[in-house]
Image (tube, rainbow, N blue to C red):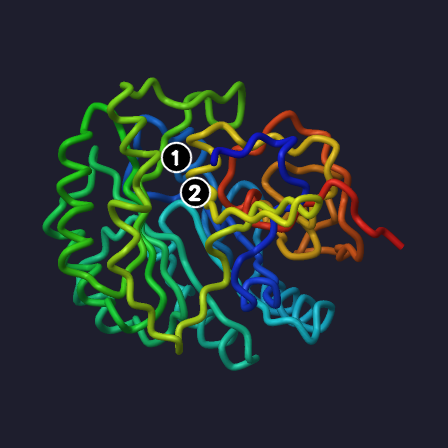
Amino acid sequence: MKYLNDEYNILDHSHSYAKETVVINWLLGTKCNFSCSYCPPWLHDGDVDWANNYHKWGTRYLKDIKKFILEVIDHYYPKKIYFEFTGGEVTLWKDLIPLAKFIRSNNATIGIISNGSRPARWWGKHKKYFDHVCFSFHAEFGKPNKFLSVVKEVNGEFRTHVNIMMNPDTWDECIQLAERISNECHNVSLALQPLMEGLGEKETIFPYTEEQQQVLDRQHHLYGQHIKWNTNFPVPRGAMEMIDTKNSKKEISSAHRLIANKINDWSGWYCYAGIENLVVDWDGSLWRGWCREGGTLGNVYEECHLPLKPILCKKSFCHCNFDIMCKKEQYANII
């Protein structure tokens, strides 16, 4: 059954661990060694340097990042806290490992989003400091064999997810890599990620052929059956349940499938962004989500105000995996 937005009234996490975890997605800088054609230039042009480095936007200090981390842990207690850092390519930042050590010493967990361009030996040396890594393969710059060697190096060490960015121009190469990962790495989740044109502006899904769209729609059946998770690696975000409370129906879905099927309009719903998710932008500005619904919550390098209630969504669509993967309901019990 393919749900339309008026055929269910709650979108929630299917795993209890995800319901108990607050995720902070943090854009640390825009230095990247890739410049993918579908990625906005401001996400990889290097214009925003890492914290503790002087740049034209002003100096941002590691000590302020640590202070904010402690504030988040205290505010959301007793929930688990998971910090997810992205860029740019965050493995290029020299202070990433010291920050990872600090986070774990305060009983929080850390993950990063990486293009996997660092050699396998780098991951072999530093993998002990991470709880989760989301790799993204970009065929314009990534090398399949090198990328696979990195995934194999960390396989079984922590929660590992791979997004294959499905550029129609490199479709066959992407499918071949997905099949190799599926066959050779049995503790890794995998998604064929549909690409969006006009990211951050008037966004539309890439013009896939009918056959390619069918593969994207069926990918769970193609690549989702091989995963045998180690229960010591709980996942902070994952599958979502589309729940029809009126008719006692449920359907498991995922962010990329919701986007692929254009089931991503929750305007008029209550969204738990800010309660389950937070976003920190490159300049330290704090938001509920990348959609920026509700306006800024302050700045982590100055002063911020952490929310206590969900917010009514006024956006016409939700394009970002991170924003999609938090609870949403039509009729929230707001006190």
Mark pair 2, 1: CA separation: 6 Å
Snapshot quadrant of residue 34: top left
Q: Where in the figure is residue 160, as x and y percent of width and height?
A: 33, 61
At x 49% / y 57%, what residue is drawn?
A: 237
Categorize mark 1 by other alpha carbons within 10 Å: few (<14), some (14-19), many (20+). some
At x 35% / y 38%, what residue is drawn?
A: 193
Q: Is residue 178 above or below residue 79?
A: above
**Would you say 276 lies left or right of 307 here?**
left
- Which quarter of the figure is the C terminus placed in? bottom right
At x 29% / y 48%, what residue is drawn?
A: 115
Snapshot quadrant of residue 212: top left
Q: Where in the figure is residue 11, as x and y percent of width and height?
A: 61, 46
Snapshot quadrant of residue 125: bottom left
**Which label was assigned to residue 53?**
none
Q: Which residue ends up furthest to the front in the rendered image?
A: 247
Nearest the viewer among 243 and 165 is 243
Secondary structure state at the residue bearing disc 2: loop
Q: Are marks 2 and 1 in contact (CB under 8 Å)?
A: yes
**Which label was assigned to residue 30?**
2
Mark sitting earlier along the chain (2/1): 2
Nearest the viewer among 267 and 286 is 267
Identify which amino acid the numbered label 2 is placed on. Answer: Thr
Q: Which residue is mark 1?
A: 45
Q: Is residue 279 above or below residue 102?
A: above
Identify which amino acid the numbered label 1 is placed on. Answer: Asp
**Would you say 243 lies left or right of 117 here?**
right
Q: Where in the figure is residue 195, as x and y percent of width and height?
A: 37, 30
